[in-house]
Every structure is written in structure tokens, then in C-alpha cells.
Amino acid sequence: MKISFTLFVVTLFTSSGLWGQRIGESRDQGSGGGSSVNYVIQPYDLLLFRVFQEPDMDSEVRVEADGSVRLPLIGDVSLFGRTLLDAQELLFKLYDADYLVNPQINLQVLEFAERKVNVLGQVNGPGFVLIPPDRPLFLTDAVAGAGGPTRLANMKKIQLKRTLNNGEVISRELNMERILSDPQSRDFPLEDGDTLFVPERVF
């Protein structure tokens, strides 16, 4: 019974299914900000769940590593790979089926999970660079975020290491110098956990 209630990359990452982006193209495609309905929910995001005129159901829930959340009445639900809009539509169907009459579901992000890349080698401020929650982080963004290259940096042979979902570690060499000089070059999107190493030039 229901109750009412900016610039850059060179190489393709074919093994990981990613591609670059031409200089000058928008970097906001496929990503939403804060509470944008197009934002893809990430593990460890903190979400605010609300149902209109049902204050007892208001909940702050942390997304688990597998993309699931635990919500009132329906229990565990997988939101893996879903945008906020997709998740709201799924939750509407689940609650409407057995628990609530035409529920008006609202889902917002209260706190984004921290995602970062590690930039090492010939940069002025080596260390972690955070990936913004509302847009991708690209190769030159990361280098700039680490204080920019030193005068000894070899920008033609930046090494990128990435761990895939199956545990395989892959490496690619990125030519940032070409990215900056060639208008047809493509920027390279980075992912959480990537490591960049900027080597020293050999004279």
C-alpha cells in the first residue's frame, strides 16, 4: 500500500577509451557542477536526499566505493555511473512503485569526493593537484597547478602513469611542448590517481 508523503595534448589513450581535445574547445562537456543534474555521481560524494513534503525522509548519505547509497524505506541502491538526473529518475520509480504516491525527489551534492593527480619531477611545486568537481583536469592544467615547469624541464617527454580498473598500470609519453605550439593538438584529460613525471632536459 502506498502512502503519500585550455589548451593541450598529443597522445590517445586507446587502452583506457579516452581521447584528447582540440585547443579552444569547451572543457565542460559531459560534466556538471555542484548540483547540476548532469554531474556524474562519484564514490565518496556526500549527497542530500529529499522528498517534497516528507521532511522525515531527508537524509545525508555518503556514496560507497561501489557507487551505492542506503536510503529510507528502499535500502541500498546503486547509483554507479549515473548523473544526478538519472539517479532522481531511478529513485522516483523505486519509491513510486511501492512506497510513495508521485514522489518529488531531489538529490544534491553537499560535498564532492576529493580526486587528485600527482605531479613530480621538474616542476616548481611538485605534489598533488586536485581535480575540480565541475570540469575535467587536463595535462597543462596539472603542470600549471604544480607551479609550472622549471627551466630544466623537458616538456617533450612527460611521463603519464595510470592504473586501470583491472589493476593494469599503463604508461604514455606526452609532448606538452607540441601541444602548446600546435593549434591542432589536443589536450589530454587526466583521471583520479594519475601520476605525471616531468623529466630533466639532457644537454
Image (cartoon, rainbow, N blue to C red):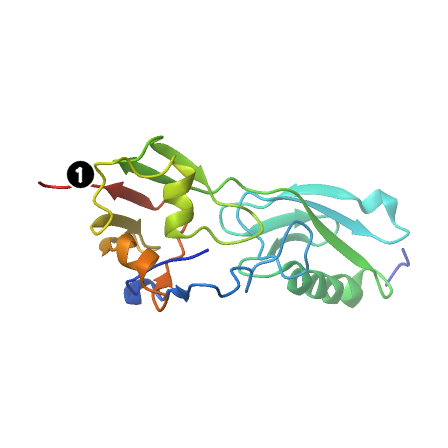
Is the C terminus in the top left, top right, bottom left or bottom right quadrant?
Answer: top left
Quadrant in the picture for residue 125? top left
Residue tagged by mark 1? Answer: 200
**Disc 1 secondary structure class:** loop
> Which quadrant of the figure has residue 83?
bottom right
Q: From the viewer's perspective, is 90 left or right of 16?
A: right
Residue 84 percent coordinates (x, y): 66, 58
Residue 98 percent location from the top left of the image: 78, 64
Q: Residue at x 40, y 44 (%)?
A: 142
- The single residue placed furthest to the left in the displayed view is 203
Q: The N terminus lies in which quarter of the figure?
A: bottom right
Name the residue nearer the viewer: 25 or 168: 25
- Is 27 in front, or is 75? 27
Residue at the spot 54% in from the left edge and 45% down from the top edge: 64
Q: Looking at the image, which residue is at 66% across and 42% down?
A: 61
- The correct choice, above or below, for 12 with respect to 55 in the image is below
Taking the image as shown, residue 13 lies to the left or right of residue 190, namely left
Q: Alpha-carbon neighbours of circle 1 within 10 Å: few (<14), some, or many (≥20)?
A: some
Q: Which amino acid does label 1 sit on?
A: Glu
The residue nearer to you, when weighing 161 against 11, is 11
Q: Is residue 11 visible?
A: yes
